Image (cartoon, grey):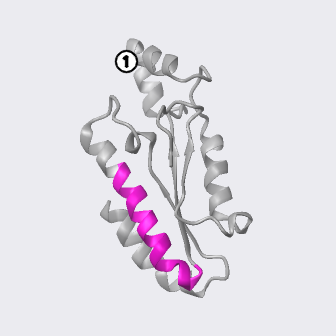
Amino acid sequence: MMHSVRLVNAAMPWLEKSDAASITLISSVSGREVDFTGPAYGAFKAALVHYAQGLAMKLAPKGIRANTVSPGNTYFDGGIWQSIEKNNPDLFAEALAMNPMGRMARPEEIARGVVFLASPASSFTSGTNLVVDGALTKGVQL
């Protein structure tokens, strides 16, 4: 958590000078729902969403936006899911079966959400948590 706080604090002088200032933190669907990950991981990811929401409210008068992106399971070469696929195929199959789209995200699919929120194309979006998970999570985000 503190690496995000320190990063935002360090960037603040430049953000305050920008005409399109934006902070985008990466959370996880594990911050929305209790899942198979360890309880500390989900709590930390939920804290990032809360932190970004607080930043959004505090920094809006300065024209600085803050949002989070919460990816679902994301598969890439060398990643944790590739390791699980090789070393724990039952868990991999279970995780894959949980997603209604029948697959995991690709990194570029998550990146597109980050780019949108960080860009001027999303200039009136602040304090949101964009879930990019292929309908994996069951909860309704209010």
Residue matched to label 1: 87
Please identify the dominant SS of the magenta region.
helix
Q: Give the magenta part as a residue range.
A: 45-63
- Within 10 Å of disc 1 (Cα), the crowding (few <14, some 14-19, many 20+) is few
Q: Residue at x 54, y 24 (%)?
A: 99
Q: Residue at x 39, y 64 (%)?
A: 51
Whether residue 69 appears in magenta in the rendering, the answer is: no
Q: Residue at x 57, y 31 (%)?
A: 135
Whether residue 54 appears in magenta in the rendering, the answer is: yes
Locate residue 121 relative to residue 81 in the image: left or right. right
Locate residue 7 relative to residue 114 in the image: left or right. left
Q: Between residues 131 and 80, which one lies in front from this camera angle?
A: 131
Q: Residue 125, image x and y in percent?
A: 63, 64
Q: Between residues 95 and 129, which one lies in front from this camera angle?
A: 129
Q: Residue 21, image x and y in percent?
A: 60, 76
Residue sitting at the far top = 90
Q: Compared with residue 26, is residue 89 higher up or lower down, i.e. above or below?
A: above
Q: Residue 45, image x and y in percent?
A: 37, 49
Image quadrant where residue 50 sits: bottom left
Q: Compared with residue 29, is residue 15 higher up or lower down, i.e. above or below?
A: below
Q: Residue 96, image x and y in percent?
A: 51, 20
* Quadrant of the frame with the N terminus: bottom left
- Element class at badge 1: helix
Q: Residue at x 60, y 44 (%)?
A: 110
Q: Compared with residue 3, is residue 46 higher up or lower down, i.e. above or below?
A: above
